[in-house]
Image (cartoon, grey):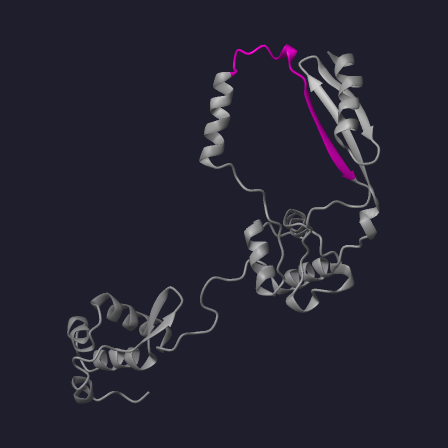
Amino acid sequence: MAETDPKSVQDLTGVRPFLFNMGKTKEHTIQVRQMCVDLHKSGNGYKKIATRLHLSISTVRGIIKKFKTTGTVVNKPGRGRKFILPPCTVRRMIREIKSSPKLTVTELQQMVASWGHKVSKTTIRRYLHATSCLGGMHGKKLLTHNHKRKRLEFAKRYWDFNWDHVLWSDETKIELFGNICSKWVWRNSRAEYAEKHLMPTVKYRGGSVMLWASFSSKGPGNLVRVHGILNALKYQDILKKNLVAES
C-alpha cells in the first residue's frame, strides 16, 4: 500500500475522522486506520498519532496491533459471533412449521433438541422472525394492583367465616365444534389465507351445551344440563331442584 504523506495528515488537524455506525459499535474508516499505520511507519508514536487524528491512544494502539498481526487494516470476513444453529437445521425447522403451522415454540424447542442442538425459545423465535415467520398468542391480562388489594381485603375480612352454609354455583357453555378463542399459526405475510392456516368452522359453531353446577364445603354438587335458553324461570327451577337437595 502507498504510504500517506505526513504533511497531508497535518491538514486534517481539527477535523474529526468519519465514523461508520455499525449497530452498537462505531468503527473507523479504512482511510483513518491506514493513516495510523503510515504515521507509525514514519516514526511517530502512539500519543502523537492520537493527537493528530483526534483518536484515543488505546484506539491507535489497537489499530497498529491488528496491522502487525494480520498485515492489513481491512476487516477479514467471518468476524463476530457465529450462528448457534447451522443453516440446515434452520431450513429443517422452517419445513416443520410450514407442514404444521400450529406447532408451539416449546414443541419446536424439543424437536430441535432431538436433532442435537439445545437452544432457548427466544433463539427459536429470533430465527423464525428472521425468515418472516410470525406468530404467537396473546396472554391473559395480569392482575392490577387494585385487583390484588381487593382480593386481599376479601380474604382478611372472611378468613374465619363459616363457609359450611355457602353454596357456590355457576354455568358455562361448551362448544361442540372447537372453541371461541383465537388460534395463532406460524406464517408469513403472503400466506395469510392459505388453507392450512385457516380454522374450519360451521354455521352457529355446530351448537353448544349449557351446563350448570355447584359446590360447597361438602364437595361438588349436581351437574345439570340446560336445554334451550337459560331465562329467569328456568334458572329458578334449577335452583329449586338442586339447592334444596344439596343444602
Give the image quarter of residue 213.
Answer: top right
Residue at the spot x=19%, y=76% of the render?
Answer: 49
Q: How many marks?
A: 0
Judge by depth and name the residue closer to the eye, 175 or 71: 175
**x then y, percent, for residue 20:** 35, 74
Which residue lies at the image location 64% right of the left edge and 15% below the top edge? Answer: 166
Q: Residue at x 78, y 62 (%)?
A: 195
State the residue at coordinates (26%, 68%). Answer: 59
Q: Quadrant of residue 26?
A: bottom left
Residue 14: x and y, percent?
A: 16, 79
Q: Is residue 47 left or right of residue 101?
A: left
| Residue 49 in the figure: left or right of residue 96 | left
Determine the image quadrant of residue 134: bottom right
How far across and down, in percent of the image, does residue 28 sit? 31, 74
Does 167 lie within the magenta span? Answer: yes
Q: 148 or 209, which is in the foreground?
A: 209
Front residue of this view, candidates 29 and 163: 163
Quadrant of the drawing holding the N terminus: bottom left
238 lies above or below 71: above
Q: Residue furthest front?
A: 233
Percent across and percent down for residue 9 are 20, 85
The correct choice, above or below, for 199 with respect to 164 in the image is below
- Looking at the rendering, in which quadrant would you find the C terminus? top right
* Span shown in magenta: 158-174
In the picture provided, is 36 more to the left or to the right than 174? left
Is 83 covered by the magenta stretch? no
> Does residue 237 lie above or below 6 as drawn?
above
- Is residue 29 or residue 230 the one in the foreground? 230
